[in-house]
Image: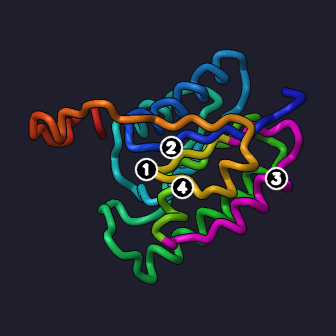
């Protein structure tokens, strides 16, 4: 690609990570190279992990605790720093066309990382690198401001709250 842009997916609705993965899969179909870095999802066997490892030109690395955290501890802060350092290395390597920073918005909102280094990554990324950032209900306003595409996933109805159905294997994880 000659011009890589910055895409952001956030909101209360389902599908942020799925959208980013879909974009990555589409790119690999055109022989582009994709690297997905997952914040706050360390070593958990989400359904996409084993599948993506089998997709040519799609690499994935997870950072953080495999359990959901309410308050970040020292381990979480360490993992956040490792993930940021690794993201910088991958983005600047000139080896990948698309880099996905999955759940980076949540990592920022939980103070696992600060927004400034993410803004630096966006500002200094090579021109040809497409950067895709996902997050939870919120994305930092400064990131939304510098992004080229911002999509908010809006929940209209969700079976978690309307039917009391919990996360389902193969669907939510």
**Residue shown at 46%/68% (left/top)?**
110
Looking at the image, which residue is at 86% across and 36% down? 128
As measured in the structure, the alpha-carbon distance from the residue carrying label 1 to the one carrying label 4 is 9 Å
Considering only vertical position in the picture, is 159 above or below 100? above
Say if mark 1 contacts mark 4, CB within 8 Å: no
Q: Secondary structure at mark 2?
A: strand
Q: Which mark is residue 92?
A: 3
Q: Percent position (x, y) of residue 34?
A: 66, 35
Task: Decide which of tag 3 and tag 2 comes sooner along the chain.
Answer: 2
- Is residue 145 a member of the stretch shown in magenta? no
**Viewer-closest of 53 and 152:** 152
Q: Which residues are magenta?
A: 111-131
> In the displayed structure, does residue 123 sit left or right of residue 59?
right
Cα gap from disc 1 to disc 2, whole angstroms: 6 Å
Q: Which residue is mark 2?
A: 10
| For discs 1 and 4, the disc positioned in front in the rendered view | 1
Camera-side mark, 3 or 2: 2
Please report whichever mark, 4 or 2, sits nearer to the chain's N-terminal start.
2
Quarter of the image holding residue 127?
top right
Q: Residues within 10 Å of mark 3 (few under 14, many from 20)?
A: some
Residue picked out by circle 1: 137
Q: CA distance from mark 3 to mark 1?
A: 29 Å
């Amino acid at each position: 690609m000659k011009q890589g842009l910055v895409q952001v997916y956030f909101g209360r609705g389902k599908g942020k990570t799925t959208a980013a993965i879909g974009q990555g899969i589409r790119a690999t179909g055109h022989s582009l190279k994709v690297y997905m870095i997952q914040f706050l999802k360390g070593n958990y066997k989400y359904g996409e992990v084993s599948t993506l490892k089998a997709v040519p030109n799609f690499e994935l690395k997870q950072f953080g605790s495999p359990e959901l955290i309410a308050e970040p501890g020292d381990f979480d802060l360490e993992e956040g720093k490792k993930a940021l350092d690794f993201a910088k290395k991958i983005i600047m390597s000139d080896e990948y066309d698309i880099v996905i920073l999955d759940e980076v918005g949540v990592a920022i909102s939980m103070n696992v990382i600060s927004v400034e280094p993410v803004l630096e990554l966006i500002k200094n990324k090579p021109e040809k690198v497409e950067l895709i950032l996902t997050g939870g209900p919120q994305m930092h306003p400064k990131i939304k401001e510098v992004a080229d595409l911002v999509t908010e996933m809006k929940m209209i109805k969700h079976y978690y709250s309307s039917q009391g159905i919990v996360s389902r294997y193969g669907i939510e994880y």
